[in-house]
Image (cartoon, rainbow, N blue to C red):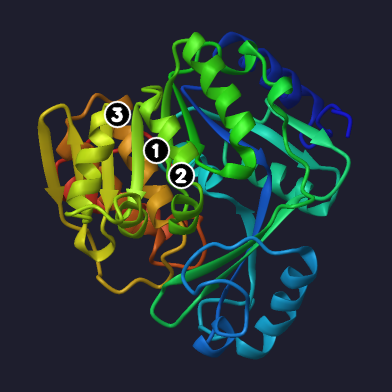
Amino acid sequence: MGVEPLPNIRNAEAEAEAEAGAEAEAPIILGLQPAALIDHVARVDWSLLYQIPGERGGSTPVEIEDLERILSEVKTHVLSAPDEPSPIKTIAGGSVTNTIRGLSVGFGVSCGLIGAYADDQQGQLFVSNMCFSGVNVSRLRMKRGPTGQCVCLVDASGNRTMRPCLSNAVKIQADELVAKDFKGSKWLVLRFGMFNLEVIQAAIRIAKQEGVSISMDLASFEMVRNFRSPLLQLLESGDIDLCFANEDEATELVRGEENGDPEAALEFLAKHCRWAVVTLGPNGCIAKHGKEIVRVPAIGEAKATDATGAGDLFASGFLYGLVKGLCLEECCKVGSCSGGAVIRSLGGEVTPENWQWMRKHMQIKGLPIPDTHI
């Protein structure tokens, strides 16, 4: 699959400005999304979740035939809502994409993506969504083949079950990464994944050479359970500056130990990372930096419409806090505000109304309001 130039998705003048901007000023935060991903998000009844392969509540890879079968079944199991005109919401997806889009749109932080997308309808949708969100796409490569897709099934309680199809999706290769991709940026955001381990390792190596700090999310409890050894090697390398884990991932990380709870996982992560964060859903989060440990409650309603993207948008807020030089507790509070905003509607993209909700809660807590016009 050969690498091709980006398509003309904006006018020539805008493209020229984008290229000049990419040379003159690198994005503050980069996201590594090796394979572009399109999310198909739907609210469904519980019965469908027992008919699909893999554990309910997690993220299990499927083949394209399974993905298409699940999408066809969704139509007969969908839970309708008055504010949702379509039973399935299709948007640019992926954990890193959600975080980067949140940083750009909601917090006004200059961001870019490194990765690949395909020359198909899904690929064009992905790039268009990123451009519309103000994300620098000059580091994305277009390739021949399919763009990755993921079905995100949300139950009546707001819990999400994900079935990604990435086996044949185009993605960036380790030998395609160059120092120019990372030069001048401050942070690289990535998600642990065994299937992208080679490109993750290459990205970390080059980023570190360019003085870029690394933020990593633990992806899913299945990924931690099934690939614990390579994950531990990454953590023990000392190259991961900031690590995010949700409660399930944290518990899986320290499973079998005498005190296998989120607090023990936080201590474990903090041994290897400068900042360690464990999110606890409606119970907020715990975090550690150096000798400081904080516990911050969740913000907003306990009941989520859709938990998709909650951790991703928490990371957006936390990273915004770090960029602004906030203390650990304030970073967690901003993350709680942005994480609380995304769960108020379907999918991993925050609506304009919910960005306003976040800004209101940030103001109440005396946090610096982003200089954005939403």
Identify the residue at image location x=69%, y=47%.
126
Give the left or right position of residue 187, taking residue 25 as reference.
left
Q: Residue 318, how many percent across, how many down? A: 31, 39
Q: Quadrant of residue 293?
A: top left
Circle 1: residue type: Phe
Q: Is residue 96 above or below residue 31?
A: below
Structural distance between the alpha carbons of marks 3 and 2: 27 Å
Residue labelled with disc 2: 102
Residue labelled with disc 1: 107
Question: Of tags 1 and 3, which is closer to the observer?
Answer: 3
Q: Quadrant of residue 140?
A: top right
Circle 3: residue type: His
| Res. 357 in view | no
Structural distance between the alpha carbons of marks 1 and 2: 7 Å
Residue labelled with disc 3: 272
Helix, strand or loop status at disc 3: helix
Q: Quadrant of the N terminus?
A: top right
Give the left or right position of residue 58, taking residue 150 as reference.
left
Considering depth in this image, is 148 or 359 the residue closer to the camera?
148
Identify the residue at image location x=16%, y=26%.
290
Considering depth in this image, is 73 or 356 the residue closer to the camera?
73
Considering depth in this image, is 40 or 102 the residue closer to the camera?
40
Question: Of tags 1 and 2, which is closer to the observer?
Answer: 2
Q: Are dots 1 and 3 in contact, CB under 8 Å?
A: no
Q: Is residue 242 above or below residue 354?
A: above
Q: Residue 81, how many percent across, how many down? A: 51, 83
Q: Are dots 3 and 2 in contact, CB under 8 Å?
A: no
Q: Are dots 1 and 2 in contact, CB under 8 Å?
A: yes
